[in-house]
Amino acid sequence: MAVTDDGNGAGPGAPGPGPLAGVRVVELAGIGPGPFAAMLLADLGADVVRVDRPGGGALGIDPAHDLTQRNKRSVLVDLKSADGPARVLELAERADVFIEGFRPGVAERLGVGPGHCHARNPRLVYGRMTGWGQQGPLARTAGHDIAYIAVTGALGMIGDPDRPPAVPANLLGDYAGGSLYLVIGVLAALQHARATGSGQVVDAAVVDGTAHLTTMIHGMLSAGAWQDRRRANLLDGGCPFYGTYETADGRYMAVGALEQRFYDTFTGLLGIADRAPDRTDPARHGELRALVAARFRSRTRQEWTEVFAGSDACVAPVLSLGEAPHHPHLAARSTFTTFGGTVQPAPAPRFSATPAAVTRPPALPGAHTGEVARDWGLPGLLDPGRAATAPGVTEPGTTGPGTTGPGPRAGAPAPTHHERLDP
């Protein structure tokens, strides 16, 4: 397995600073798509400072193994304390990007909403990561990935028609529809801020991003080329030459032989070219599927992998997470790397002039307070009293400059976990 651990997370060759070197990001601790988005920015070279709350994180695993916190630094700030908001605003004043994943209105009540931050730093890109978005009937309700992809129609496309929809972990909603769209929005807004001097708010909602991912399917649906039901289409397992098949050892092979020339190679190597029914006749797809399935069950996954290796049949073994780093192609590309003894996906995508790398293990809560205080010029992080009267921070029961809602009320109940139960 071509994974490396040179102590610097460098991989082959000398690592570069990453294309986002010099960009400062403040991330308010949360769970789900927000931390992954911040990790991606950190992987690409940004200086990401995660503001953790006293008491640790909420993922439920040892923070030393929370890989979404790699390449970051962490400081501890209690946003419910008298000086907590001021300390966060001092960070925001020195940052290019600010990321939070609270429910709508919570950041404002805590005194670190967009209005508070932009009053201190008009150029700031303020990224908001939620499941339902900042507006709408469900905006303030709880939810998780599965609910978000359910209402967009994406979940309903996955799986067998006579069984419940298959759950694609939380990759489709949280990370594809959420994290990646937040990163795209933040980078676009950062470009605008550098060109104009004006920051803005990026409202990234998992429902919006996931719906956007289905754009091509909606086009096909409009054209009559897609049926709005599971396993009835070219790309959802409805065709016998695009799907998965069990092998003799109970494992699986994935087939994607869509184009005719690739299909011809596939049937030839599978050994059914002389008896396969017409693939263009949907009425014979059941017969074709049964023939393909029977052939795959005649050999093990490894045997079929060797049969199709290096061909244009568009066939690949279905690997587990533990097996994936050992795949010859992924190993040759160092798609996975080892840092601190943990095998993990390497930063992506790749850059010719500013290669990214894993350079830090997962940031433990508060482990870098001294570093950040020095590097960002924030002695208040080490001496909280120095930040308690910082300009732009509202006192309880008041509304300060640039706020978008009432400040925290004296005697009001403290938000639970910053009211960040989920995206």
Image (cartoon, rainbow, N blue to C red):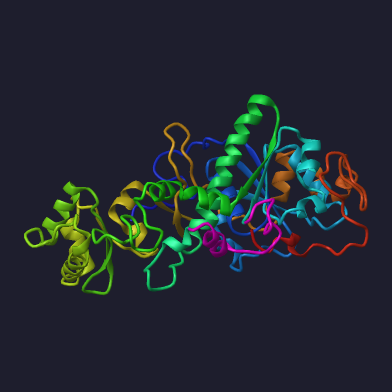
Inspect the magenta stretch and tell me whether residue 143 lies in it: yes
Q: Nearer the viewer, residue 166 or 304?
A: 166
Quadrant in the rendering for residue 116: top right
Q: Position of residue 53 (x, y in %)?
A: 74, 59
Which range is magenta? Answer: 132-153
Quadrant in the rendering for residue 68: bottom right
Q: Main secondary structure of the magenta part?
A: loop
Residue at point 92%, 53% (across, down) = 396
In the drawing, does residue 231 fall left or right of residue 354?
Answer: left
Residue at point 30%, 61% (across, down) = 238
Residue at point 80%, 36% (across, down) = 120
Q: Is residue 324 above or below residue 123?
A: below
Q: Given the current orientation, which residue lies at the most extreme top position? A: 195
Q: Nearer the viewer, residue 2 or 144?
A: 144
Inspect the magenta stretch and tell me whether residue 245 lies in it: no
In the drawing, does residue 382 fall left or right of residue 291?
Answer: right
Quadrant in the rendering for residue 236: bottom left
